[in-house]
Amino acid sequence: MSAQYQVHGDVAVITLANPPVNGLGLATRQGIVDGLNRAQQDAAVKSIVITGAGGAFSGGADIKEFGTDKSMQEPNLHSVIAAIENSPKPVVAAIHSVCMGGGLELALGCHYRLAAPGCSVALPEVKLGLLPGAGGTQRLPRVVGVEPALNMIVSGETVKSELIGFIPGQKLFDKMAASAEALPEEALAFARSVADTRPLPLVRNLPCKHPQGDAYFQFARNMVKGMSKNYPAPAKCVDAVEAATKRKFADGMSVERELFINLMWTPESRALRHLFMAERAASKIPDVPSDTPKRDIKSVGVIGAGTMGGGIAMNFLNAGIPVKMLEMKQEALDRGLATIKKNYEAQVKKGKLKQDKYEQRMALLSTTLDYADLKDADLVIEAVFEEIGVKEAVFKQLDAVCKQGAILASNTSTLDVDKIASFTKRPQDVVGMHFFSPANVMRLLEVVRGKETAKDVLATVMALAKKIKKTAVVSGVCDGFIGNRMIERYSQQAGFLLDEGATPQQVDKALEKFGMAMGPFRMGDLAGNDIGWAIRKRRALERPDMKYSRTADKLCELGRYGQKTGAGWYDYQAGKRDAIPSDLVNKMIEDHRKELGITPRKISDEEIVQRLVYALVNEGAHILEDGIASKSGDIDMVYLTGYGFPIYRGGPMHYAGEQGLFNLVQAMNRFAQNPRDDQAFWQPAPLLAKLAAEGKTFS
Ligand code: T1G
């Protein structure tokens, strides 16, 4: 049973036991009700304690049950909380470590709350596109006050138990335990001390008012307007809390219930819940057990002090790991050091980093011109020029100087990690660690697994990624791994649309309206159009089947690499980043259409978005077929954390499922009729076609 029942003298203790965070799944809810019934029937029991086993009181409703009938099956959370409230014997919540969502709502239904310091308390439902659905919007305002409650509910942020407001006469916790270790004993003593209290204090009976009434809620609605642009939940949180101040408790609960159920079925909530699970699943590698021993990473070498090398180094310095940075020339090292200092000083200036922290981090950084100085590094990451010959020279050096057991990683964004590993006598220690620029900012880290990469190397790098606050996704070896392989298809479609009649600004606007952080052409100007140009030149030899619009090459032949050359798809004023539509570029595109004999046509935003996003999805399906990614949620995490895909759409593969794969295939068949297009381009991947035919979606 997912709740244990024990009697200590005259106190019954119900302990939630549903690891890892005592999610309030059906079995746990049943266990609580059974425990309450046993306690009522035992005359020796005078009061009851509810607490949590392991590292949590409770992390809330069991997210794994969402979307299944278990989550609504009786006893649902409302019934459990009602059983607690109606208990004739006092029920004390003994709270520690994590008390979130339904866990806090359960505690609010108890007659008393005893908390250990340092416990993370939150109603984070809004981060799942929901709102507290078991009385949190009606009870929390009654114990901490309307404004503190609404702030917690709308933000979903966590507060520590010892910091949460004790409003005179109204408080969330009746008593703070001396420590988490002392909590069990103190809970028994506290339960005995309240055993004879009558009537039992019910939160639902507390008043709930805001002095400014309507004016406050109007202010609150204005405050959440920005957040609600793409998510309905924040505004609904305001509605629910307002109901707590205007209606009787039972009516307020009905309002909350209706709002919660409606939100549960919104695409935004489905997307956020999918991503919550996908992010955690990404850290699991099917054939690498989570208890695989990991290598100790106490020091890191970074080769290359350029933009990427410097950004990579900062990730480790931020995590308190010493870094030795190597370059070929002193001036390159000096430049790299200066860039790191500039980045940190900018953070100190903005108040984002304390001066002493900055100094501590810089003290962990050393530089060298000599490979021999890397001999003791536990991990070395190279971020040198993206050319296989250069990588070969670097890895041969590393193989010669690094100690046995050192992990040798390449930051390559497309080159063959197996080939790189073959430059060493230790391919089992070689792995790809593909950071995204700016490397100290972007959360995504593609961990590229070579054929011979050892399992403990993978386990080590995945754990290290968490330590440096990266979202790591494992990719197999292929051209472009996961993200860049898919973005190539996306970019091809963007180019074809220009040939057919669209302008760069129209395409960008359509994708930014869809929710992408940046459209493809603004993104090219930011990253540098010459990067894609080099890849297309290489591809022309290796993959002649990959067709592109010539516009991107023509742009580069004009030297318009983007912001770094002051002009790209767009014009830029000196020192400014505002993208200004370029008459010259639009003329170049028009002339190119004439060369192709194409009469430009008006293209809808819907077609633009579908062609770029479905191109991503189709390639993603191939990536799953090829085993480059092990699950579709991994692909979604790549696009969320590395390419600015809108979080409220859940990632390209989840979004495809929401559209219906059958509809995607229909649209792709329509696009394939387009004479301009490469017919093979829109051939649905076999996996996509199969799932569409079966009415399924990506798992
Ligand atoms: N249900 C089920 N599993 C959960 C869970 C939950 N609520 N929370 C976490 N897990 C799993 C997670 O999937 C992972 O599993 C493991 O625990 C460790 O998670 C009616 C409807 C609690 C602060 O939104 O914020 O209550 O991958 O890696 O960094 O109003 O998890 O090991 O198999 O995140 O130590 C509201 C969400 C639910 C809390 C722990 N509650 N969780 O962080 O570990 S909705 C939440 C968290 C609700 C009611 C509504 C964090 C954490 P696995 P982790 P962590």
Image: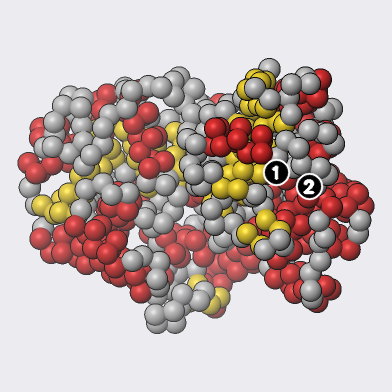
Q: Nearer the viewer, residue 601 or 179?
A: 179
The residue type indicated by label 2 comes to Pro
Q: Please, which residue is most extreme toward the top here?
A: 1
72 horizontally vs 592: left or right? right
488 horizontally vs 110: left or right? left
Query: Which quadrant of the view contains residue 540?
Result: top left
Residue drawn at 71 percent across, 61 percent down = 169
Residue 536 to residue 348: above or below: above
Residue drawn at 81 percent across, 20 percent down = 41
Measuring from the top left, give residue 296's x and y in whole percent. 26, 32
Q: Secondary structure at mark 1?
A: strand
Q: Nearer the viewer, residue 510 or 331?
A: 331
The residue type indicated by label 1 comes to Tyr
Give the label on residue 314, or none.
none
Q: CA distance from mark 1 to mark 2?
A: 8 Å
Query: Which quadrant of the view contains residue 238?
Result: bottom right
Give the label on residue 112, or none.
1
Residue 222 to residue 446: above or below: below
Q: Which quarter of the rendered picture does the N terminus lie within? A: top right
Give the label on residue 201, or none.
2
Residue 143 to residue 371: above or below: below
Whether residues under marks 1 and 2 lie with C-beta atoms below 8 angstroms apart, the answer is yes
Residue 82 to residue 268: above or below: above
Measuring from the top left, give residue 613's x and y in whole percent. 63, 48
Query: Which quadrant of the view contains residue 398?
Result: top left
Measuring from the top left, give residue 112's x and y in whole percent. 70, 43
Q: Which quarter of the rendered picture does the C terminus lie within? A: top right
Measuring from the top left, give residue 327's x and y in whole percent. 15, 53
Does residue 223 appear anywhere in the picture? Answer: yes
Residue drawn at 35 percent across, 74 percent down = 349
Q: Secondary structure at mark 2?
A: loop
Q: Earlier in the sequence, mark 1 or mark 2?
A: 1
